[in-house]
Image (cartoon, helix red, strand yellow):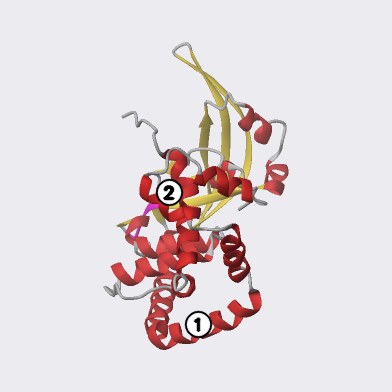
Amino acid sequence: MMYEEIMEIRNSPKLNTQERVDFSELTYEDFIDYHELVNDSTYWGEELQKFEEQWNNEYGLIDKKIDSLIEYYNIKYEKEKLENYVKIEPIQYYPYYKDIDSILIDGYRFEFKLTPIKGKLDKVSFSFNLKPIKPNNRSLENFGLMDEIDVFHFTPFSNVVNVFGFIVDVNNDKWFRVLRDKKIDDLLKNYEIVYEVQSLTFNGIYMFHGDFEPPFEIMRYNKSINEGESSSVIGYRREYISENILKNDDYISLTSYKEKQKDSILGLNQKFQMVQKFQIMKYELKNRGKTLNF
């Protein structure tokens, strides 16, 4: 935080009387001292090692239980998931136009090959989407280029069958940029087709994918891991698992523990406490005086 920025906040008309009194005692040197300590890698390297040892002694056992729980449900899902019953492969896609009651349906038709794995299937429904093989962190396309497209096959089959999925209303630059003038092999160089078998009937037994998924808390954790989210977010997911599945709300993740211990050390210095409060104030002032429209 630069000197000019500090003075701008201290002189802000949005501060109340008590805040002005509190912050008036802070000096620029206080900020320098605070940031020097916060960024002292040698000091914190030793302290963080101590924190981790303390955390292991207090929470290591419950953390191992969380690992075991995650592993159990993920292995169970891999064994039971509906994708084990049918193999889905793309064959081709091409533009699709059809006039229905004077309404032009404009889009693309995808053709897939379904192969039963464990035997005859009476019915199958699945969804598919396109996702970039090399994600761009700033692109919403990471989460899929479209709403998931549902495909249904209601005729019993023991051998390979071909089915079709229709993508309509693709009158936008995003779709035409990805799909136009390409064959399926060209498309798959940059995008993967992601499938999810929604339901099927096997040996007369109806199966729905939601019946085999891990608990919601573990699915959220898996998603955070797969998407490379921060250690803070992943730690929060583990705390959520402990609280809601293991019914233990005393657990705290290693990342959260280190952050709290670090804050407690900085909080021993009254001036540093005020510097922290001052830095939070920087963001609070932006919203003060704003009118909320409901």
Q: Amino acid at mark 1?
A: Glu
The answer to whether residue 118 is visible is: no
Q: Is residue 249 left or right of residue 15?
A: left
Q: Is residue 277 above or below residue 286?
A: below
Secondary structure of the residue carrying tag 2 is helix
Residue 57: horizontal and vertical position, in percent?
42, 88
Residue positioned 53% across, 46% down in the render:
143
Q: Is residue 19 left or right of residue 271?
A: left
Give the residue number, with chain letter if any, for mark 2.
20
Secondary structure of the residue carrying tag 1 is helix
Residue 202: horizontal and vertical position, in percent?
36, 58
Q: Amino acid at mark 2?
A: Arg
Q: Give residue 182's quadrant in the image.
A: top right
Residue positioned 42% across, 39% down in the render:
14
Part of the protein shown in magenta = 198-203
How far apart are the two marked residues, 2 and 1, measured between alpha carbons?
39 Å
Q: Is residue 207 above or below residue 148?
A: below
Residue 267: horizontal and vertical position, in percent?
44, 70
Q: Which disc is residue 224 wearing?
A: none
Residue 261: horizontal and vertical position, in percent?
45, 75
Q: Residue furthest top?
A: 102
- Pick the quarter of the image with the C terminus: top left
Looking at this view, is 152 or 149 the one in front? 149
Give the residue number, with chain letter if any, for mark 1.
52
- Report crowding for label 2: few under 14, some 14 to 19, many 20 or more residues within 10 A (C-alpha): some
Looking at this view, is 25 or 221 the one in front? 25
The answer to whether the residues at label 2 and label 1 have Cβ atoms under 8 Å apart is no
Residue positioned 42% across, 58% down in the render:
120
Residue positioned 72% across, 48% down in the render:
189
Dominant secondary structure, magenta: strand
Is residue 144 shown in magenta?
A: no
